[in-house]
Image (cartoon, rainbow, N blue to C red):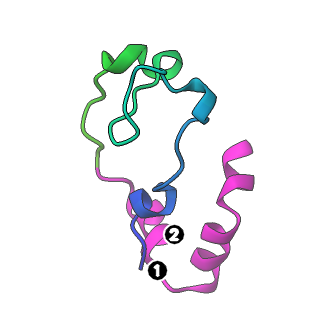
């Protein structure tokens, strides 16, 4: 089963937002992260019902993962 991080893995900011002086291997994005100066705290453990939506094989969980972009818009 995919973890929440694996679901979003590979989704990077648009290439036109990448700093032109940064490498392809370690790109930096000035518009979204202040050139790497933004430091986010570690993620907390999600509530059990939300974790189940990401990890369970139930119909509801499968539907949630399939339509997650629609849910995010709410």
- Picture quadrant where residue 66 is located: bottom right
Q: Is residue 66 left or right of residue 61?
A: right
Most prominent secondary structure in the magenta stretch?
helix
Q: Nearer the viewer, residue 1 or 50?
A: 1
Give the residue number, with chain letter if any, for mark 1.
56
Report the disc number at residue 53: 2
Q: Is residue 16 left or right of residue 8?
A: right
The part of the chain drawn in magenta is 45-74
Q: Is residue 63 magenta?
A: yes
Report the disc number at residue 30: none
Q: Is residue 37 left or right of residue 30?
A: left
The relative height of residue 17 versus residue 71 in the rendered view (above or below) is above
Residue 74 seen anywhere in this rendered image of the structure: no
Q: Is residue 15 magenta?
A: no
Element carrying mark 2: helix
Residue 68 seen anywhere in this rendered image of the structure: yes
- Picture quadrant where residue 14 is located: top right
Q: Residues within 10 Å of mark 1 (few under 14, many from 20)?
A: some
The relative height of residue 46 versus residue 37 in the rendered view (above or below) is below
Q: Is residue 2 left or right of residue 73?
A: left
Can you say which quadrant of the picture contains the N terminus? bottom left
């Amino acid at each position: 089963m995919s973890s929440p991080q694996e679901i979003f893995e590979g989704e990077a900011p648009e290439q036109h937002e990448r700093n032109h002086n940064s490498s392809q291997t370690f790109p930096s994005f000035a518009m979204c992260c202040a050139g790497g100066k933004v430091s986010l705290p570690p993620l907390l453990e999600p509530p059990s019902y939300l974790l189940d939506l990401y990890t369970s094989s139930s119909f509801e969980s499968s539907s949630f993962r399939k339509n997650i972009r629609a849910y995010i818009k709410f």
